[in-house]
Image (cartoon, helix red, strand yellow):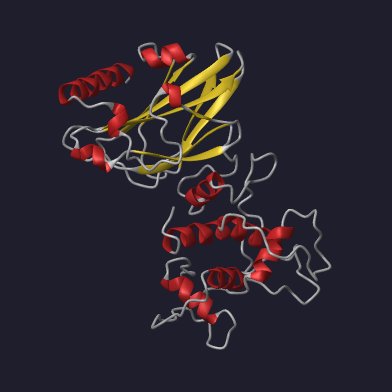
């Protein structure tokens, strides 16, 4: 595999030389939050435990008859210690001809030279596939990672988002077949959710509390500062992590609390409450001619419009028996999935 990678790199380099293209000019149009990081000198710095959202590939490269893109990262290592590299959450299915190749270098000089492969990490990435690789440092210093996306000369180079982290994967979110896998890592990369136990666990089966819910909504909106500096709720205080989130949610009509003086931060958020808050955050859009496919959702329910709207927007799907279960507790795995779909279908992101 390593020999193939070298041959592939050589072939791509030859293509670039024949076509008189430069990597810097061709990669300029990639819409990546870390760009420009297409060379060792411009490598994005990774912090242990931090999950970074990234993107690789560029359709414009296809027009230039060039089929190669690369991202560079770096992080500090100590000799003898082991660092786990996670690359997860691809949002586009890659063709069989596409390969995501990763190489590691222990110095900027070697990274620029690109001929000495200290660590060869060959991932054949596909949609929602997770890969991790344990890197045991042989030196102390700065470690460089090169991620390359290559296709054959007859294929279009797809653009795909992904997440990358060093020691930043959740121990309890590993199965890519779980519906909450992509939503969890996507929202983690945006800082919307942060996990437990120093970011090592997500606890997807835990009930989502009202405090967590408004905090997730607030962070998804960019953590805007509330206009008010105080509240009539007696069960929250300024030192609470969700204090500003609650004030913002009340100001924007997303929640009114359990009463004028009680917010109920520890209360479990129901599925009906969750979609209602999302609907209110979206501006209470009309359901139009959308049909109600749930037997347990009736006109007159406070959550009726919210559920029908969320269903029509592909945010919720309900259960196989034709019910929505509005009174059911909303688990963290469900909450992040609702938010992920909201960002994708309402905000046109994700």
Expressed as whole percent of the image width and height from the top left, the position of residue 72 reads 43, 27
Horizontally, is 162 left or right of 149 in the view?
right
Q: Is residue 95 above or below residue 220?
A: above
Task: Return the residue nearer the eye: 128 or 225.
Answer: 225
Going 18% across and 24% down the picture, which residue do you hit? 20
Horizontally, is 336 left or right of 18 in the view?
right
Residue that lies at the very extreme toward the front in this rendered image: 227
Going 45% across and 72% down the picture, which residue do you hit? 311
Expressed as whole percent of the image width and height from the top left, the position of residue 25 reads 29, 31
Residue that lies at the very extreme toward the bottom in this rendered image: 300
- Residue 82 can be seen in this image: yes
For residue 110, what is the image quadrant? top left
Expressed as whole percent of the image width and height from the top left, the position of residue 119 reads 44, 17
- Residue 296 can be seen in this image: no
For residue 272, what is the image quadrant? bottom right
Q: Is residue 212 above or below residue 81?
A: below
For residue 122, what is the image quadrant? top left
Expressed as whole percent of the image width and height from the top left, the position of residue 290 reads 40, 80
Going 55% across and 11% down the picture, which residue do you hit? 138
Horizontally, is 63 left or right of 139 in the view?
left
Q: Is residue 266 above or below residue 98?
A: below
Task: Return the residue nearer the eye: 146 or 248.
Answer: 248
How many marks the image carries: the answer is 0
Query: Which image quadrant: the N terminus?
Result: top left
Going 33% across and 36% down the picture, which residue do you hit? 28
């Amino acid at each position: 595999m390593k020999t193939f990678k070298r041959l592939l790199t050589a072939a791509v380099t030859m293509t670039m030389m024949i076509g008189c293209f430069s990597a810097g000019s061709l990669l300029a149009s990639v819409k990546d939050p870390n760009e420009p990081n297409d060379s060792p000198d411009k490598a994005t710095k990774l912090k242990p435990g931090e999950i970074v959202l990234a993107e690789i590939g560029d359709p414009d490269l296809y027009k230039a008859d060039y089929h190669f893109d690369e991202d560079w990262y770096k992080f500090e290592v100590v000799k003898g210690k082991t660092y786990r590299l996670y690359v997860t959450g691809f949002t586009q299915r890659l063709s069989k001809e596409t390969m995501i190749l990763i190489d590691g270098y222990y110095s900027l000089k070697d990274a620029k030279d690109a001929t000495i492969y200290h660590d060869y990490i060959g991932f054949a990435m596909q949609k929602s596939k997770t890969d991790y690789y344990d890197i045991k440092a042989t030196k102390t210093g700065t470690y460089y990672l090169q991620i390359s996306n290559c296709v054959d000369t007859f294929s279009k180079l797809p653009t795909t988002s992904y997440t990358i982290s060093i020691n930043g994967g959740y121990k309890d979110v590993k199965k890519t077949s779980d519906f909450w896998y992509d939503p969890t890592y996507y929202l983690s990369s945006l800082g919307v959710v942060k996990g437990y136990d120093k970011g090592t666990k997500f606890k997807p089966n835990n009930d989502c509390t009202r405090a967590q819910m408004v905090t997730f909504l607030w962070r998804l909106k960019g953590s805007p500062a509330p206009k008010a500096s105080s509240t009539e709720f007696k069960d929250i205080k300024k030192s609470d992590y969700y204090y500003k989130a609650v004030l913002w949610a009340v100001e924007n009509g997303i929640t009114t609390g359990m009463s004028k003086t009680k917010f109920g931060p520890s209360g479990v958020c129901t599925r009906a409450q969750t979609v209602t808050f999302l609907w209110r955050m979206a501006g209470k859009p009309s359901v139009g001619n959308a049909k109600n496919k749930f037997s347990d959702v009736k006109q007159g329910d406070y959550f009726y419009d919210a559920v029908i709207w969320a269903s029509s927007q592909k945010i919720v799907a309900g259960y196989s028996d034709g019910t929505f279960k509005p009174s059911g507790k909303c688990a963290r795995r469900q909450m992040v999935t609702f938010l992920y779909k909201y960002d994708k279908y309402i905000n046109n992101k994700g």
